[in-house]
């Protein structure tokens, strides 16, 4: 039987997060596994394609980063009370950062939502979950809220 000791739960603080978190916490509790809750601050260099000024990009990145810590604390407090949990916030291209963190942390399972950010972002950049599923070397559980 597969052994699941560490679960990476990728969150984006959208309305999908509680559902994704619930699945990760439920599995972790049942298997006595640890959860690593991960938020990826988007890499701002991708937005340069839209003729946005460097100052606007910097302000946007700062706003995201400052809110991420507060949102993460609230997420962990609300959704992971009964399991061993750690939180991490990293910066980069979300699919790559999720996969790299899962590898670095020796995770056994990734739990990720299939809907999160705005439709416009999906059109321009594609689905994070889809890219993670296609490239992951470990099982990925997708959750459609």
Image (spheres, rainbow, N blue to C red):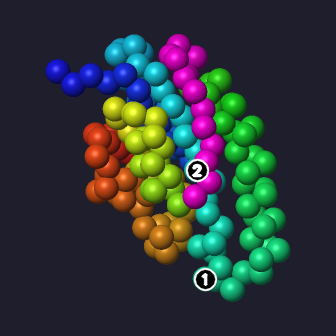
Of 60 and 145, nearer the camera is 60
Q: Which quadrant of the figure has residue 13?
A: top right
How far is disc 1 from disc 2 in space, using C-alphas?
20 Å
Category of crowding for the residue at label 2, using alpha-carbon neighbours closer than 10 angstroms: few (below 14), some (14–19), many (at least 20): many
Q: Residue at x 42, y 49 (%)?
A: 99
Q: Residue at x 43, y 67 (%)?
A: 126
Residue 124 vertical placement versus 40 (above, below): below
Of 106 and 73, nearer the camera is 106
Q: Which quadrant of the figure has residue 79?
A: top right
> Is residue 57 in view from this perspective?
yes
**Taking 12 as reference, is 51 left or right?**
right
Q: Which residues lie in the magenta part? A: 80-92
- Image coordinates for residue 142, horizontal then vertical, percent: 35, 44
Q: Where, quadrant-wise, is the N terminus in this rendering?
A: top left
**Taking 67 as reference, is 27 left or right?**
left
Magenta highlight: main SS: strand
- The single residue placed furthest to the bottom in the displayed view is 51
Inspect the magenta stretch and tell me whether residue 90 lies in it. yes
Q: Earlier in the sequence, mark 1 or mark 2?
A: 2
SS at badge 2: strand
- Image coordinates for residue 7, horizontal then vertical, percent: 41, 30
- CB atoms at circles 1 and 2 under 8 Å apart? no
Inspect the magenta stretch and tell me whether residue 113 lies in it. no
Question: In the rendered image, which residue does mark 1 sit on?
Answer: 49
SS at badge 1: helix
Category of crowding for the residue at label 1, using alpha-carbon neighbours closer than 10 angstroms: few (below 14), some (14–19), many (at least 20): few
Question: In the rendered image, which residue does mark 2 sit on?
Answer: 40
**Taking 28 as reference, is 86 left or right?**
right
């Amino acid at each position: 039987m597969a052994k699941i000791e560490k679960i990476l739960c990728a969150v984006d603080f959208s309305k999908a997060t509680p559902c994704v978190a619930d699945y990760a916490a439920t599995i972790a509790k049942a298997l006595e596994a640890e959860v690593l809750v991960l938020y990826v601050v988007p890499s701002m260099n991708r937005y340069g394609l839209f003729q946005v000024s460097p100052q606007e990009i910097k302000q946007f990145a700062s706003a995201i980063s400052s809110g991420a810590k507060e949102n993460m604390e609230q997420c962990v407090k609300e959704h992971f009370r009964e399991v061993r949990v750690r939180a991490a916030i990293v910066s980069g291209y979300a699919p790559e950062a999720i996969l790299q963190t899962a590898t670095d942390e020796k995770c056994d399972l990734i739990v990720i939502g299939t809907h999160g950010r705005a439709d416009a972002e999906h059109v321009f950049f594609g689905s994070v979950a889809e890219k993670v599923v296609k490239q992951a070397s470990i099982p990925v559980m997708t959750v459609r809220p």
